[in-house]
Image: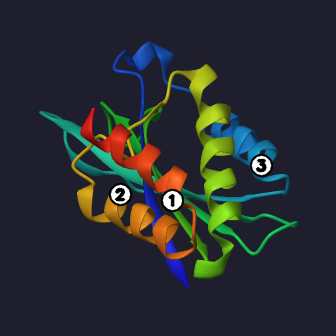
Amino acid sequence: MAYWRLIFRGPGDPSRWSSLTDIASLVAKAIGAPVETYEVETLEGNPHDAYVGRATITGKRPDAAVRVAIEVMQYSAYSTGARQNSDIFVELQALPAEFAAKLETWHRLRDALAPIHYVDETLTSCNEEHSSRIVDEAERFGHTETAARLRREMAD
């Protein structure tokens, strides 16, 4: 299965970070199916910098062979304190022939996360290897206009 790695930056202001439940609900709505959520119990770090952990959200679109695996970065000032959810890393998995379904899933996730202040940096971050994979796949399956548009977005 071919996969794409997407990056959504969370809001810089921790007071605007959303709960894991809210994020999972938006992801479920975007893919049109229930999702499973797993939150690690122990955060790692120290009281001088912060404690960090990850939560995962997984699901599969019922109408297409696209699997979604999401890693949500979590921060806390205390090892047992309230967690704030920050950046989101998404892995979309599907057969290469499912290009259109993966592209649609990406856009659904982007649109679902935007109202809670997440910014899609898939094409603009230090993610060139993964961005190029998406463009190459677009070209390979005849989506030349999409490939050209994605290249322009990468250059901006």
Separation (CA) of disc 1 from disc 2: 15 Å
Whole-percent x, y for residue 69 in the image: 57, 64
- For label 3, count other residues whose C-alpha is less than 10 Å away and answer few (under 14), some (14-19) or many (20+): many
Residue 94 visible: yes
Horizontal arrangement in the rendering, residue 41 relative to residue 28 (left or right) = left
Task: Identify the element where label 3 is drawn.
Answer: helix
Residue 147 placement (x, y as % from top left): 46, 55
- For image coordinates 70% across by 70% down, the residue present is 66
Using the image, tell me which numbered label, if any, was put on residue 144: 1
Q: Quadrant of residue 78?
A: top left
Circle 2 sits on which residue? 131
In the rendered image, the residue lying farthest to the left is 48
Secondary structure under badge 1? Answer: helix
Q: Residues within 10 Å of mark 1 (few under 14, many from 20)?
A: some
For residue 28, the mark is 3
Residue 58 visible in the snapshot:
no
Q: Amino acid at mark 3?
A: Ala
- Of the numbered discs 2 and 3, the one sitting upstream in the chain is 3
**For the point 35% across and 48% down, which residue is it?**
151
**Quadrant that contains the N terminus:** bottom right
Q: Residue furthest bottom?
A: 1
Q: Looking at the picture, does residue 130 appear above or below residue 153?
A: below
Its colouring scheme is rainbow
Q: Which sits earlier in the primary sequence, circle 3 or circle 1?
A: 3
- The disc labelled 2 sits on which kind of residue? Ser
Where is residue 117? Give x, y as percent: 51, 21
Instruction: Please name whichever residue, 7 or 24, is drawn nearer the observer in this view of the structure.
Output: 7
